Every structure is written in structure tokens, then in C-alpha cells.
Amino acid sequence: MKFVCTNMRLFLILSLLSIGTYAYNQEIKLISVESLDNLLAEQSESVRVYNFWASWCGPCVKEMPHFEEVNSTKQAEVVFISLDFPEDLAKAQKLIDKKGIQSTTYLLNSTNYDDYMPKISEAWSGAIPATLFVSPSGKRYFYEKAFEKNELVQVVKNLASK
């Protein structure tokens, strides 16, 4: 009987630990182009950062922890927007889970680049990583490049006063 109780206790502890682990992972939600437009138009008192990435993009994956740190330290509101194909949602989710991403994360439910790229920035050639910064006053700043941590923090700091 003691063996059964010990095993049950172990099972219960492991079950609770696994629930706790999954509770912290951000679930990727599909977002339409129209909903993305609405999201970008929202007002905020802090800098908003929209990072466009894909699970197959090495520079995108490399810079994600920098954006996550900016979000977790409340320097800015960071939103990740995956440009993976909608059928690759599980692949993108696996990456988010592996990286421990807590920032709000979406997967754009459109493969028609002409639908969304000009709405983000007329200057966007389609290359990723790409990031749209929106200052508290609503002014937009678009970068089509990978960010190093110090550079990202500096851009956010500069925009916080604009």
C-alpha cells in the first residue's frame, strides 16, 4: 500500500508541475488582416512594438529574446506576429514554447503579402525580421532588420518621449 501511495503522490506532483509549465506558455492566436489593422490603430501610453517573424527565419528567432526582455521589463508593449503559413501554426507554437515567450503572439491568417505589407509600411520590401514601433503619440517607425539588444532598447527609449 505504501508503494501505491508513493506512486500516486509522485504522479500528482508531476501532473501539477506539468500544468504549471503549460500555464506560462503563450498560445498563438490567428489574426486577420482587418484585426491587425485594428490592433495597430489602438492607442497606448507606452511604446508599442510589433515584431514580424517566422519560425524558419534564423535572424528572427535570434532576436526574439531581446524583444521578450523589453516586454517583460515593461519598457514597451511587444506583440509578435508570425508570418508562417497558417497550416504551420503548430510549428510556430513549438518555437514560442521552446523560447518561453510570454508576449502576445499572433499568426497572420493571410498569405497575400499585398493585403498587409502596405498597411504596415510602404517601405516594407517583404524581408523579415521587420519591426513596427508606434510611439505613444501614434507616430510609426518601421525597420526592416534584425536588432541587437542594446539597439532595440535605445530605439524604445528614444520613442518613449515622442
Image (cartoon, rainbow, N blue to C red):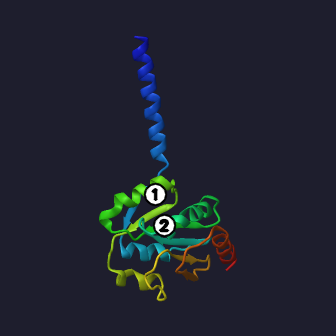
Q: Amino acid at mark 2?
A: Phe
Question: In the image, is 147 to the left or to the right of 10?
Answer: right
Q: Residue at x 33, y 69 (%)?
A: 85
Q: State the mark number for residue 96.
A: 1
Q: Residue at x 62, y 64 (%)?
A: 70
Q: Are marks 1 and 2 in contact (CB under 8 Å)?
A: yes
Res. 28 image quadrant:
bottom left
Q: Residues within 10 Å of mark 2 (few under 14, many from 20)?
A: many
Residue 79 coordinates in the image, percent (x, y): 51, 67
The residue wearing badge 2 is 80
Question: In the image, is 128 to the left or to the right of 63?
Answer: left
Q: Give the mark toward the camera: 1 or 2.
A: 1
Q: How many marks?
A: 2
- Outermost bottom residue: 122
Residue 124 coordinates in the image, percent (x, y): 47, 85
**In the picture, which quadrant includes the N terminus?**
top left
- Outermost top residue: 1
Res. 157 image quadrant:
bottom right
Depicted 143 relative to depicted 63: above or below: below
Of the two numbered discs 1 and 2 on the same chain, state the one appearing first in sequence: 2
User: Which secondary structure lies at badge 1?
Assistant: helix
